[in-house]
Image (cartoon, rainbow, N blue to C red):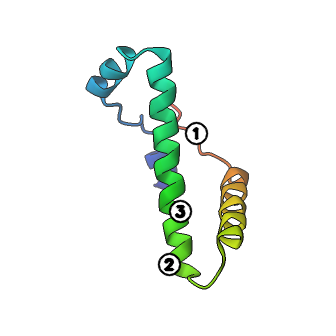
Amino acid sequence: MINKERNKIAHTDIELMRLRLKLSPGQRIQAMLDARSLMIGIIRGRLRKQFPEITNVELNLKLLEEIKRAKSIPAWSQSIS
């Protein structure tokens, strides 16, 4: 059953795709950087809540560990069936 769920086509927001196509390459990069900043802030906030006593340097090291761990997790493909 789980494999069947993974083989479904991922939902695409057509309107969002149209809006993104209207952006210049620089605006697309800025949107990507803004999304990255948001995610880093969310992760940093979660880590700060988990470890309120650590220094900012230690927090940044934990953030890098978290990113490294996330990169090591294989992505699941969204194949079309």
Q: Earlier in the sequence, mark 2 or mark 3?
A: 3
Q: CA distance from mark 2 to mark 3?
A: 10 Å
Residue at 50% over, 70% down: 46
- State the residue position of label 3: 43
Of the two numbered discs 1 and 3 in the rendering, the one whose residue sits closer to the viewer = 3
Residue at 55% over, 64% down: 44
Instruction: Tell me which amino acid carries mark 1.
Output: Ser
Q: Quadrant of residue 48?
A: bottom right
Question: Height in image: 62 above or below 80?
Answer: below
Q: Find residue 49 and name its label.
A: 2
Residue 61 image offset from top left, x and y in percent: 72, 65
Instruction: Tell me which amino acid carries mark 3.
Output: Ile
Q: Earlier in the sequence, mark 2 or mark 1?
A: 2
In the image, is 63 to the left or to the right of 30? right
Residue at 48% over, 55% down: 2
Q: Residue furthest front?
A: 56
Q: Earlier in the sequence, mark 1 or mark 3?
A: 3
Q: CA distance from mark 2 to mark 1?
A: 33 Å
Q: Find residue 77 and name its label.
A: 1
